[in-house]
Image (cartoon, helix red, strand yellow):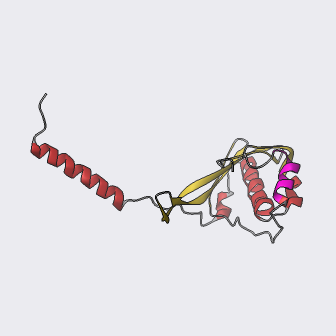
Amino acid sequence: MTRPTTFARMRRLAFATALCAAAAAHAQLPVQPAANQEALLASADPALAANKKLVYDFWREVFEGGHMELADRYMAEGYIQHNPNVPTGRAAFVDFFKRFAKPKEIQPRIAAPLVSIVAERDLVILSFVQPTKDPKDASKTSTTTWFDMFRIENGRIAEHWDCAPRQ
């Protein structure tokens, strides 16, 4: 086995330095919200379009708008919650959010920075821009994406998943 020459080692070092410089020059691009939320509701499949609209309106009216009295319009009574901080069941969901969600004017668009809406079979996924602090330097931030996934059954939200840890 032969050892690399000094020239070969220097060439490898130069290549590694160039890669690091390129990585720094092409740092993470921020996640961007969709400019046109209404376009995200479109689907060639009418059932998928209806599922997207159901989740979109639930998010605007119940979750962001705080109108818990509208929950039965969108959520199945036996609603299953997979977020460890929120109880299962429509009534339990309503009771939980009534403690701090005060009704306000319902907006025509989702206020949170919505990136996309994806629907497949009976599932709808909303993705949002999620700002994060750098754990090594709190003055620096970056973005990632937060996902909420819903299962639709008989025209109502029957189940929800997200990536929230227990708090």
Instruction: Answer left or right for 108 relative to 27.
Output: right
Q: Quadrant of residue 110?
A: bottom right
* Front-lying residue, 108 or 133: 133
Residue visible at 79% across and 65% down in the picture = 65
Q: Is residue 3 magenta?
A: no
Q: Quadrant of residue 70?
A: bottom right
Q: Which image quarter is the N terminus in?
A: top left
* Front-lying residue, 165 or 155: 165
Residue visible at 83% across and 47% down in the picture = 155
Magenta stretch in the rendered image: 88-97
Residue visible at 83% across and 67% down in the picture = 102
Instruction: Answer left or right for 23 relative to 64.
Output: left
Pinpoint residue 164: horizontal percent, then vertical percent.
Answer: 66, 49
Which residue, as the protein is rendered here, is positioned at the far top?
1
From this view, report whether residue 111 is shown above or below residue 77. Answer: below
From this view, report whether residue 129 is shown above or below residue 15. Answer: below
Q: Is residue 95 magenta?
A: yes
Main secondary-structure element of the magenta-colored stretch? helix
Residue visible at 35% across and 59% down in the picture = 24
From this view, report whether residue 77 is shown above or below residue 62. Answer: above
Pinpoint residue 39: horizontal percent, then vertical percent.
Answer: 65, 61
Pinpoint residue 7: horizontal percent, then vertical percent.
Answer: 10, 46
Instruction: Answer left or right for 105 relative to 5.
Output: right
Query: Exactly how many numbered labels are in the figure?
Result: 0
